[in-house]
Amino acid sequence: MTSSPSVDFVSGDAGNSGALPPLSRIAHLSDALRQASERVRLVCFDVDGVLTDGGVYLGATRSPDGEAPRPFEFKRYDIQDGLGMAMLRESGLTLAIITGRVSESVAMRARELRIPHCIQDPEARKLPALQRLCADLGLTLADVAFVGDDLPDLGVMREVGLPVAVGNAVPEIRRVAALQLNAGGGHGAVREFAEWLLKARGTWDDAVERYVQSRSVMKERSGQPQMEHTQ
């Protein structure tokens, strides 16, 4: 079993039961947690319950020519989460999605956010998948932050350098998390973590300025100058 560095649990104000401290107090992080945040090179996310609220919309369409119904699946993603992930990527961190449910929606979201590693394993063997990814990238599990919420994430979170629980995580996940977020999955948890990590590393202000500058550049499109504003 690969051992990860010991990381102190983050506590907020007294009596706050381990909630994430306000970002204005980021300077008061423990040395162990700050070191873990600075070591991170790969940030991995679960999907259902982390990038989404855990809900899945299932249905089927029936064509008029009598063909078999075509199933479809919808998930809801948070736009601010997406921007937070883009800022992590633009800050030089490698991003990955590791999920135990196969969905074209996830593949679409990964492409949209330019996430290079999207692993969908229907048997939810997340730790072996992450180990293979780390080997391919020349990293160790101690270089990884993983954001999870439920039991399929437990094996991974016991091993990585920075295990993170969203606000709706089950007790078993919260117990092993070095960091607990306030926001729930699909409702800003990923954005909260992105801001926390970049602030802990002292790069948040630079990331904001870099984003603002990148969205303030005039581009020529079809012969007409337009302000770029897409995420």
Image: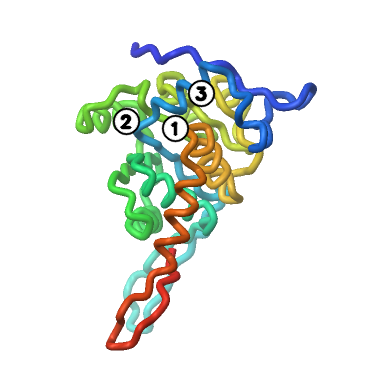
Q: Nearer the viewer, residue 215 or 52?
A: 215
Q: Amino acid at mark 2?
A: Leu
**In the rendered view, would you say 160 is above or below 197?**
above
Q: Which color scheme did the rendering employ for the protein?
A: rainbow
Kindly report the distance in space between the C-alpha atoms of the residues bearing marks 1 and 2.
Answer: 10 Å
Q: Position of residue 205 (x, y in %)?
A: 51, 46
What element does badge 3 sit on?
Answer: helix
Q: Position of residue 117 (x, y in %)?
A: 29, 44
**In the rendered view, would you say 98 is above or below 134?**
below
Residue under numbered circle 2:
130
Are the residues flagged by discs 1 and 3 in contact, CB closer than 8 Å? no
Q: Position of residue 104 (x, y in %)?
A: 35, 57
Residue under numbered circle 1:
146
Residue extending farthest to the right is: 15
Does label 1 or label 3 sit earlier along the sequence? 3
**In the rendered view, would you say 44 is above or below 16?**
below
Which one is in front in this view, the residue at disc 1 or the one at disc 3?
A: 3
Residue under numbered circle 3:
34
Q: Residue at x 56, y 32 (%)?
A: 165
